[in-house]
Amino acid sequence: MILRYSRPEMVAIWSPETKFRIWYEIEAHACDAMANLGVIPKGNAEAVWKAKDVEFDVARIDEIEAVTKHDVIAFLTHLAEHVGSEEARFVHQGMTSSDVLDTCLNVQLVRAADILIADLESLLAALKRRAIEHKHTVRIGRSHGIHAEPTTMGLTFARFYAEMDRNLSRMRDARAEIATGAISGAVGTFANIDPAVEEHVCEQLGLVPEPISTQVIPRDRHAAFFATLGVIASSIENIAVEIRHMQRTEVLEGAEFFSMGQKGSSAMPHKKNPVLTENLTGLARMVRSAVIPAMENVALWHERDISHSSVERMIGPDATITLDFALARLTGVVDKMLIFPENMLENMNKFPGLVMSQRVLLALTQAGVSREDAYTYVQRNALKVWEHRTDFKEELLADPDVTAALSVEEIEDKFDLGYHTKHVDTIFARVFNE
């Protein structure tokens, strides 16, 4: 994580101060539950809450850890400095470090998911607004990068909306799957701690108890979470690449907003580069880079090892912070994106009428011409347009094989742009459910 690609609210989730605050709440709630069960004196549980307004000293905890070589023990030692060693003697009773570490990590991931869900909702609002704005703005659709048939800019935004709406559902599911906690003790058998403690702690933290843990929460949950982040990142790149293509000089159907005073190149003053969407392509790669390590974390030795730990200390903050930034950046790009309808029509007509070839092909077959012959008639005229930039309709009208099957009026009819946009309303109703 670097500040250049970070936003404060998501960064705060992963700060040492936040982590130690969550650790403290886990321990304090566990003490309450154990006191209610009569396992520890109520006075000791109440004493732990004396630290509820304490700002834990990160430097002091690091100092202790330098000696203990154990982060949870270092924290518990520092907590006792605030609570009192006698009052704190029942803290962590029957618990193991993973109870604290794993439950805390899932709290952080849930909080991160809430921010990402809000980010997706903002992006969806921007995509919907632009889709409606350009519902009937005709542009050429492309396959293999080559002109295919007419579509609309609104449909382009609408398909991105539908994709991101699926991602919102995935993110909500990932949040639900990761929202578990475990306070089950060494190897997860509850031998030294009552399951009621786990239930109480999870309820207080907005989690549900992990149905069965070893000494760790199963990492398939985390693999699914980070895989979801990777899919969302790929969708961001999908949109970014389309915008980058549209901004190419020889296309110029859309472009990132270019602000007053912005410079495109240190050498060439004329340049307006798609730097934001290029940046999003790079950020998407970084988010996806967390997916494979998260999946490799699933296979741990027996009831626990810590091979997953170093991985999660990196990918937890990096992937969520980067994706949060990327979603916010993409929302801004979509919201302020420049659209050039005149260029869309000019591009579509670069080879006059050529994009109507399928309509002519179908009309010939419906008029009794075999598909093989119809394809030959249409293609030979289309190739003339490719090679000589002539008008496709005029070539067809001059072809005796074509005019033998179709009248002038029937040929003329096949060049109506409205034919290709007649179902736009139907598609919009499907996408936006309205």
Image: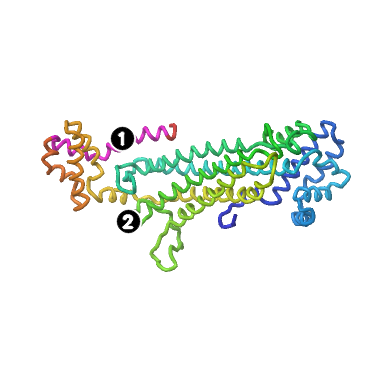
Q: Amino acid at mark 2?
A: Glu
Residue drawn at x 31%, y 37% is 421
Tell me: residue 50, above or below residue 39.
Answer: below
x, y percent for residue 223 = 59, 41
Instruction: Classify mark 2: residues with Cα within 10 Å, few (<14), some (14-19) or many (20+).
Output: few
Magenta residue check for 410:
yes
Q: Amino acid at mark 1?
A: Lys
| Image: magenta residue range | 405-430
Which of the two labelled residues, at mark 1 and mark 2, occupies the earlier sequence position? 2
Q: Which residue is mark 2?
A: 250
Left or right: 414, with 250 as reference point: left
- Which quadrant of the structure image shows residue 141? top left
- Which quadrant of the structure image shows residue 27? top right
x, y percent for residue 97 = 74, 44
Instruction: Classify mark 1: residues with Cα within 10 Å, few (<14), some (14-19) or many (20+).
Output: few
Q: Residue furthest front?
A: 302
Q: Secondary structure at mark 2?
A: loop
- Which quadrant of the structure image shows residue 159? top left
Say how the picture is coloured: rainbow
Residue drawn at x 20%, y 49% is 385
x, y percent for residue 240 = 44, 50
Tell me: residue 398, above or below residue 388.
Answer: above
Determine the main secondary structure of the stretch shown in magenta: helix
In the image shown, does 396 or 339 lie closer to the viewer?
A: 396
Magenta residue check for 358:
no
Left or right: 150, with 298 as reference point: left
Q: Residue furthest bottom?
A: 267
Q: Which residue is mark 1?
A: 422
Residue drawn at x 83%, y 39% is 46
